[in-house]
Amino acid sequence: MNEDNFNINTFNYFIDSEIMDIETFNLIYNFVALDNFRQGEYEGNMYVIRKVNVNHVQLEDEVATENTPKPTVHVYTKREFLRLLQLHRPNI
């Protein structure tokens, strides 16, 4: 599996476990989209979204298991992350 497919699969798991409703979607979207938040973290149920800087976002699977002793971190550009997030926007 190539890295792009791995990142997409991780993003899909993130969506399934974190995006429960439009309010949660909007919180996450605005956190990533707004340049006023240059750095910081959004802690969800299973994932942490970390803004590294204005243009890069890390998605960290914070649940470690026996098979994965340390968290897995995926890096997205802000633009890429928001594009993927828009594809999963809940219907109102």
Image (spheres, helix red, strand yellow):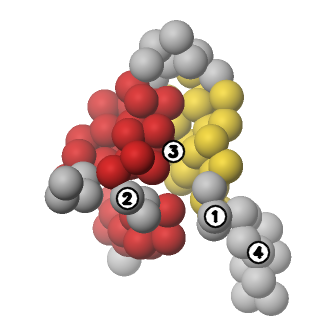
| Secondary structure of residue under mark 2 | loop
Q: Earlier in the sequence, mark 2 or mark 3?
A: 2
Which residue is under mark 4? 64
Q: Earlier in the sequence, mark 3 or mark 4?
A: 4
Q: Earlier in the sequence, mark 1 or mark 4?
A: 1
Height in image: 1 above or below 55? Answer: below
Circle 2 Cα neighbour tier, 10 Å, few/some/many (<14 / 14–19 / ≥20): few
The kind of residue tagged 4 is Ala
Residue 81: image location, x then y, percent: 36, 42
> Disc 1 or disc 2, which is closer to the eye?
2
Q: Earlier in the sequence, mark 1 or mark 3?
A: 1
Quote the CA–CA distance across marks 2 and 4.
Answer: 26 Å
Q: Is residue 7 visible?
A: no
Which residue is under mark 2? 21
Which residue is under mark 3? 75
Which residue is under mark 1? 45
Quote the CA–CA distance across marks 3 and 4.
Answer: 18 Å
On the rendered structure, is 39 left or right of 76? Answer: right
Residue 55 position by quadrant: top left
Quadrant where the N terminus sits is bottom left
The kind of residue tagged 3 is Val
Height in image: 4 above or below 55? Answer: below
On the rendered structure, is 90 left or right of 66? Answer: left
The kind of residue tagged 1 is Asn
Q: Residue at x 71, y 63 (%)?
A: 62
Residue 77: image location, x then y, percent: 40, 34
Residue 65: image location, x then y, percent: 77, 83
| Secondary structure of residue under mark 3 | strand
Height in image: 12 above or below 89? Answer: below
Quote the CA–CA distance across marks 1 and 3.
Answer: 19 Å
Query: Is the residue under label 4 in contact with that under label 1 (CB below 8 Å)?
Result: no
Query: Is the residue under label 3 in contact with that under label 1 (CB below 8 Å)?
Result: no
